[in-house]
Amino acid sequence: MRKTNSPKRRTKEFWRSPVFVVCTTTALVFGLRMISYLRSDSIDPQVMVEAASSQSNASKSTGPGTATLGIFDPAIKIADRRREAAALLLAASLYITDETLQGRPPQNVEVIVSGLIEHKLMPPEVSMSARSGVLTSPHSCLYLRYRPTSHPGTFGVETVSGGRERSDGPALLIRLSGDEQDKAVDFHQATQTEYVTIPQPFAPASALIAAGWTDD
């Protein structure tokens, strides 16, 4: 007698499938890596914003080794944009995992973005723009790229963040990949703020470095 392909049986098979293993493992690794990455940020946590009435104290020394940064300091903008891009990538990967567990894996970026908006998973201040496939925030233009497991390659999600102005800093790329030849999580940053070559989706690290991107 032929066994029926019941929902319970399909769910059990999916829990053992490569799709589930790749999605959950990479999402977990990415989350742990992000915690370590953000803790090791180079920005001095002592950020001082002085009111106009206290400008008379500006000549006083803050002590050796202490950095005083304003809220518009480029280093702070870059750190905020990195966290923003990472938050978008993490939200997308978790959404993909949840949808796949329910038997409806997203087929393209448009479906993922719509799902993030519908379920209120979009990072703060990130929203859709008038341009198709482009997300925006006060200091970034963000592009979400997706490679489903049905692709000849393998599962992957990456976020490209470009500064809206030159003072917003260089372009950033964060990638979550299930390809055994890649690191589970990759961070890349353009070495200049102008005339930057945006890499093709899921370009190998060697191509990124050749195009003038660093490998963090």
Image: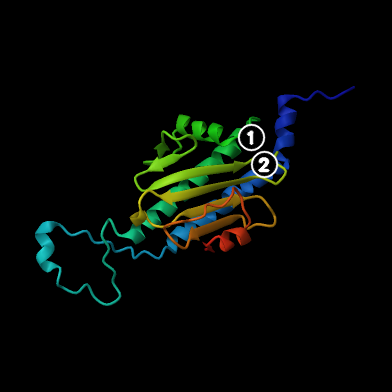
Q: Which residue is mark 2?
A: 20
| Res. 98 image quadrant | top right
Q: Earlier in the sequence, mark 1 or mark 2?
A: 2
**Where residue 129 sits: x, y (%)?**
41, 35
Residue nearest the viewer, comparing 163 with 155 = 163
**Where residue 151 sits: x, y (%)?**
69, 41
Q: Are marks 1 and 2 in contact (CB under 8 Å)?
A: yes
As drawn, the label of residue 205 is none
Q: Residue at x 69, y 46 (%)?
A: 154
Where 54 falls versus 162 (above or below)? below
As drawn, the label of residue 101 is 1
- Left or right? Give the position of 47 relative to 106: left
Q: Residue furthest front?
A: 195
Q: Residues within 10 Å of mark 2 (few under 14, many from 20)?
A: some
Q: Secondary structure at mark 1?
A: helix
Residue nearest the viewer, comparing 11 with 123 = 123
- The CA distance from mark 1 to mark 2 is 7 Å
Q: Residue furthest bottom?
A: 64
Q: What's the amino acid at mark 1? A: Leu
**Res. 36 visible in picture:** no
Q: Residue at x 27, y 77 (%)?
A: 64
**Where residue 51 sits: x, y (%)?**
15, 57
Image quadrant holding the N terminus, namely top right
Q: What's the amino acid at mark 2? A: Phe
